[in-house]
Amino acid sequence: MKIVTINFLLLCTLLPQTTMASPPHHSRVFLANQNIRAIESALEMFYLDHGRYPTSDEGLYALVEKPSSLSDAGIYPAGGYMKKMPDDPWRNPYQYRHPGLHNPNSFDVWSLGADGQPGGVGENGDCGNFGVRCYEKEESLLERFLKYCFA
């Protein structure tokens, strides 16, 4: 029993370096997914007030500042639908298209991923509101075990 306990303690103290690299990435992934959801909500509020989504030309900044093409000025909220448009966690602007390629009856909102380029796989892959969540590395059994060691 002493050997099992010693091995457990050694494992918990010697292997945390394997998980220390992943949390910043996981935080970025979580933030990207949350931002996309917040942008979707703001776009839906815009739709409820104006009966349409912003055009691709108006872009996401139509949620921050009233577009000149919007005729019903009285409905647009004084502070906009969002205070500011965030960049994705990799410091790139979120992408927007209406009508959406993936959502032809509404819009697509997405991040280009860590590399800021269209396409890619894993952390560099595009992700958005079209069924592809931002890349989340699946935790290994060892990573789950270490979470319990240091929780």
Image (spheres, helix red, strand yellow):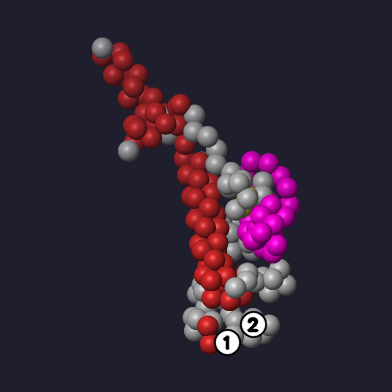
Asked if disc 2 and disc 1 are in contact, CB closer than 8 Å, the reply is: yes
Q: Amino acid at mark 1?
A: Ala
Secondary structure under tag 1 reads: helix
Who's the residue at 66% across and 49% down the image? 126
In the rendering, which numbered label is found on residue 142? none
Which residue corresponds to mark 2? 70
Which quadrant does the C terminus fall into?
top left
The dominant secondary structure in magenta is: loop
Relative to 15, does residue 6 appear above or below in the rendering?
Answer: above
Could you tell me residue 134's position as x and y percent? 58, 47
Of residues 55 and 2, the one drawn nearer to the viewer in this rendering: 55
Who's the residue at 73% across and 48% down the image? 119
Relative to 62, does residue 97 appear above or below in the rendering?
Answer: above
Could you tell me residue 79's position as x and y percent? 49, 81
Could you tell me residue 72's position as x and y percent? 59, 85
Dot 2, crowdedness within 10 Å: few (<14), some or many (≥20)?
A: few
Magenta extent: 95-124
Dot 1, crowdedness within 10 Å: few (<14), some or many (≥20)?
A: few
| Residue 35 makes an appearance in the image | no
Which residue corresponds to mark 1? 73
Of residues 116 and 47, the one drawn nearer to the viewer in this rendering: 47
Asked if residue 64 lies in the magenta stretch, the reply is no
Secondary structure under tag 2 reads: loop
The answer to which image quadrant residue 150 occupies is: top left
Whole-Å distance between the Cαs marked 2 and 1? 7 Å
Who's the residue at 61% across and 46% down the image? 132
Relative to 141, does residue 74 appear above or below in the rendering?
Answer: below
Could you tell me residue 95's position as x and y percent? 67, 61
